[in-house]
Amino acid sequence: MADYVKGEIMELDLIIAEIKRRTAKKAVKLIFSAKENISPLESKLGGKPYWDVEMPYPRDSKGKTMPLLLQLSLSEININTSLPKRGMLQFFISDDMDCECRVVYHEKINPDFTLPKKINVMPNGGFSPVLKECKVSFKETEDYIGVNDKNFDPVLHKAVKKVTKRDITGDIFDNFSDGECDKLFRILTGAGSKLFGYPCFTQTDPREGSEILLLQIDSDDMLTMWGDYGVGNFFIDKDDLKNKDFSKVKYYWDCY
């Protein structure tokens, strides 16, 4: 453990402030409000989705219809993002512990749509991280890298160098006391339900490439719950996002 950080609470605060300065990024906070029978044309968590019956409905590898996790009526997001400005973006996941997903972008909405008659809907009796159907609203926020992000350690090294003029190697456990590590985890979490920004994980960062966070849905005691209080993430390649190609989105969830 490095002596220069022991008991130096003010110094740790400066390091945290420098990490925030280096990684500040705009995100869109998702605000969930429990409500029943939300229109399929609105942004919503769970419930019955908008769907054009002329399109094949999303199914998992077992052939089972996939329930809607979240749909975004993009015109409701009055915040400048990399998402399309119009249409509907939907996230469907498998109704089990597998990490199967289908992300569908409807560039145009058919106002004369008909809901499929037999589909799996969250919340349900199966694997359902959705506890209550919710209306979704949006708020612009500033986000910062979390300690369990795979890119955190290089940022930490540069922040410590900037504040203390010293070089360190390794992770926070190699350089900070238990109390200081607790503070870093408490402040730099990446937690929350959001679009873009930085992800959080209860285990480890699974990303092997340079994908960015597209969507994160965190656990909430009353509205959402991933296993034993976990989190669900959806990642996308920057070029795919630019090209409005959501066919290769990667889905991952973990829990304590």
Image (spheres, helix red, strand yellow):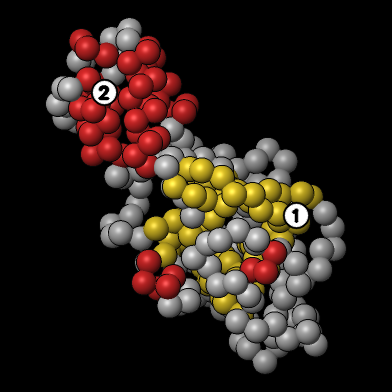
Q: Is residue 66 visible?
A: no
Which is nearer the eye, 230 or 111? 111
Label 2 secondary element: helix
In front: 147, or 206? 147
Above or below, 37 against 182 in this view is: below
Q: Nearer the viewer, residue 15 or 175?
A: 15
Labelled disc at residue 134: 1
* Identity of the residue drawn at 37% across and 42% down: 23
- Tell me, yes or no, whether the two marked residues, 2 and 1, touch with CB atoms within 8 Å: no
Which quadrant: the N terminus? top left
The kind of residue on which mark 1 rests is Cys
The residue sitting at 28% across, 18% down in the picture is: 176
Residue 3 versus residue 125 in the image, above or below: above
Name the residue: 37% across, 13% down. 10
Left or right for 110, reference 193 = right
Q: Quick check: 10 left or right of 208?
A: right
Percent of width and height locating residue 35: 82, 54
Residue flagged by tag 2: what amino acid is it?
A: Val
* Residue 79 in the image, given as x and y percentages of width and height: 60, 58
Q: Examine the image and state in which quarter residue 48 appears.
A: bottom right
Cα gap from disc 2 to disc 1, whole angstroms: 44 Å
For disc 2, the marked residue is 163
- Quadrant position of residue 112: bottom right
Looking at marks 2 and 1 on the same chain, the residue that comes earlier in the sequence is marked by 1
The answer to whether 171 appears left or right of 227 in the picture is: left
Where residue 63 sits: x, y (%)?
Answer: 56, 78
Q: As drawn, which residue projects farthest toward the bottom?
A: 54
Local crowd size for mark 2, using a 10 Å CA cut-off: few (<14), some (14–19), many (≥20): some
Q: Which mark is residue 105?
A: none
Residue positioned most to the right? 37
